Image: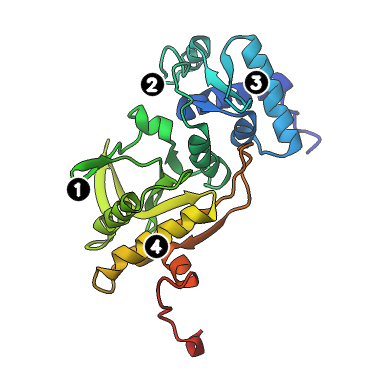
Amino acid sequence: MNSEETPLDGNIIAAAYDEQICLGLVRFGYLTARMIAGLIRDASPSGLRTAQRRLKALVGRKWVLSERLPNGIPVYKLSAKGAAFLRELGHDDVPRRGTRDARLGNAYHRALTNNFLIFYVNPALDYWPEYSILRGRAPLEDLPFENERLRPDALIDTPGDTGMSWVEAENAPKRPKRLTKLIRFADHLFADWNGFSFGRDGVQYVIRQMVFICPAPAQARAIARAFTNVMSELPPGGETKNRVHIVHAPMPSSLIWPEIRWETAHELAVKLGYIEDEEPAAER
């Protein structure tokens, strides 16, 4: 630090963390301490200790409420007092009751997408977790397809050619019929043009990718099979081959985000022998 620079006051830093935590709870509904550490700093031991200290203070002020999941992991929600704190700072669209009414539901399913957004996605990008989508804060809530309205588990907006990603969390095996429908839906979005385009609040969005987060190999294999079945019924070409992705994320019940591996559904289908490799070995 330059000798002429004034160190930041610890109270100012703590206040900034408190604001970030409360805003994160508005966005996600509820979070674990580790997820909050990832939002305000990182999930290193020192980052986790910082998050735990700020959460202890916020719970003490009754700005944040603490609950426990069935497996004993504590999670945190925003209280009405915490919501009032944010409104006093000038933040709009903060529910008066905070997020105390957010249902814990299937916490593992929610944690898959929340951890993906917090620990993998560039924080400079716009993204909307499931809670924000359910609350109507995302640019898209659902889309009609085959007599049903399909809703994403998360949305990520990457400006430029990459476009928006529609995210599905595969915490439990889905029926083959359901997975096949999702792959057909992906082809519906990508097959005839560069992506499904829509506008909201003066901003134009384009959905160009579908991402499946899979905590176990069985889910990933099921997606690869569904992908193979749909692709076998379609003419060659199109964008679906390159735009359906699988994220291998073996997250344990402790909800600690693992090292992940990313590939397309087509690449996995080739590895598993469901699809014949189109690239001759001599050309690799």
- Residue type indicated by callout 4: Arg
The Cα atoms of the two marked residues, 1 and 3, are separated by 45 Å
The Cα atoms of the two marked residues, 4 and 3, are separated by 44 Å
* Most foreground residue, 280 or 41: 280
* Most foreground residue, 228 or 200: 228
Q: Nearer the viewer, mark 3 or mark 2?
A: 3
Q: Secondary structure at mark 2?
A: loop
Above or below, 218 relative to 76:
below
Q: Secondary structure at mark 1?
A: loop
Q: Secondary structure at mark 3?
A: helix
- Point out the tag, 4 or 3, that comes first from the N-terminus: 3
- Point out the tag, 1 or 3, that comes first from the N-terminus: 3
The Cα atoms of the two marked residues, 4 and 2, are separated by 42 Å
- Local packing at callout 2 (Cα closer than 10 Å; few below 14, some 14-19, many 20+) is few
The Cα atoms of the two marked residues, 1 and 4, are separated by 21 Å
Give the numbered dot on residue 55.
3
- Residue type indicated by callout 2: Asp
Q: Residue 97's spot in the image, x, y percent?
A: 44, 12
Instruction: Please identify the residue farthest to the left as the structure is shown.
Output: 147
Q: Nearer the viewer, mark 2 or mark 1?
A: 1
The Cα atoms of the two marked residues, 2 and 1, are separated by 34 Å
Q: Which residue is mark 2?
A: 93
Label pair 1/4, CB-CB below 8 angstroms: no
- Local packing at callout 4 (Cα closer than 10 Å; few below 14, some 14-19, many 20+) is many
The Cα atoms of the two marked residues, 3 and 2, are separated by 23 Å
- Point out the tag, 1 or 4, that comes first from the N-terminus: 1
Q: Residue at x 28, y 39 (%)?
A: 142
Give the numbered dot on residue 146.
1
- Quarter-of-image position of residue 253: top right
Q: Residue 104's spot in the image, x, y percent?
A: 49, 25
Q: Nearer the viewer, mark 1 or mark 3?
A: 1
Q: Which residue is mark 4?
A: 225
